[in-house]
Amino acid sequence: MEVIKLENIDSLPCSTAITIGMFDGVHKGHQLMLQELKTHAQNNDCKSAVITFANHPRNVLAEKLNKDKIQLLQTQEERFAKIAKSCVDYLICIDFTLEFAALSPKQFLDILIPKIHPKILLLGYDNSFGNPKNSDFKDITSKGYYKDIRIFQDKMGLYENGIEISSTEIRNAIVKGNITLANAMLGENYSICSVVEKGFQVGRNLGFPTANIAITEQKLIPKNGVYATKIEIGKKIYKGVTNVGYCPTFQRDNKTIETFIFDFNEEIYAENIRICFVDFLREEMQFANAEALKSQIGKDVLDAKKILD
């Protein structure tokens, strides 16, 4: 997959079948659409291209819409890497701005036409692009074409446990601690990759040394509580228990993500590791003393091993 910024494209040497969206999470609904896109490209003797954004439109428009910004399921690097797994030919990235948001759908397509020569535009059933106050989108989707572009729109979404799969529903599940539902919709375990930093050494003093990872603002953090997790360190995968929260027994002010990694005693400060959330074990609780907390952590480890083994 070739990644190109739209502004750097003069003219691709081929025609394309395209789809447009943020693709946060690249969930199972997105994955199905990407497979459809490849089929359209093969059937029409052209290349497949995903048009996406460097920044989330909602966060650019938040102040204008009087809405809160959202935290994302993936970093840009994670999103692009997961899109690449679908084996599309091109990923074309656009910097979303207020000026871009003002474009009508037809104006946007007119920018794309000389640069990437789209023959097919594939849309999700609830997908849209361009200024929503403009009637262009309804016009081109009802006709099924715009200039030389044929437009296909899916008729319905994909469901998991009776819930429509969407980035929004996945975020809702994660903040509620329903990590198994989020994982089912994503088609993989939700994960956070960050650098290991020094903590308060509480876990070490209790006999359960933890790796504490730095929290980034844009990435969505799961609900406070204790999770069964898998941990990627380099090319190896370990099992563990992760606590997300404020360590109320010791009344910490800052939220932390602390992971006790089973059968592991290496020094990994300043290294990047990935925490993959498999299942929610329990709510974060305040204990009467350190011994009570130590006893509970021991139970958490046993519960996690039953799930992860």
Image (cartoon, rainbow, N blue to C red):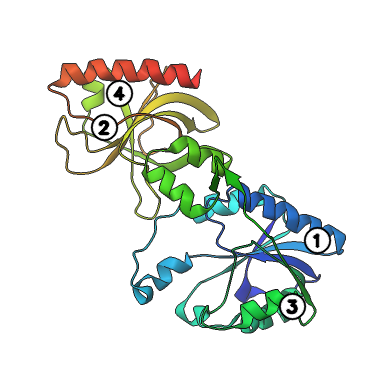
Marks 2,1: beta carbons within 8 A = no
**Sooner in the amino-acid sequence: mark 1 or mark 4:** 1
Instruction: Depth check: give the residue in front, 85 or 162.
Output: 162
Residue 17 x, y percent position in the rendering: 76, 65
Image height of 285 relative to 8, above or below: above
Residue labelled with disc 4 = 209
Residue 52 x, y percent position in the rendering: 59, 64
Real-space Cα separation, disc 4 to disc 2, in angstroms: 18 Å
- In front: label 1 or label 4: 1
Estimate how packed mark 1 is, as few (under 14), some (14 to 19) or many (20 or more) residues with alpha carbons within 10 Å: many
SS at mark 2 in the image: loop
Q: Residue at x 49, y 32 (%)?
A: 232
Residue labelled with disc 3 = 143
| Residue type for callout 1 | Ala
Real-space Cα separation, disc 3 to disc 4, in angstroms: 62 Å
Residue labelled with disc 1 = 41
- In front: label 4 or label 2: 2
Residue labelled with disc 2 = 284
Marks 3,2: beta carbons within 8 A = no
Q: Residue at x 24, y 15 (%)?
A: 295
**Sooner in the amino-acid sequence: mark 4 or mark 2:** 4
Q: Is residue 70 visible?
A: yes
| Residue type for callout 2 | Glu
Residue 97 x, y percent position in the rendering: 47, 76
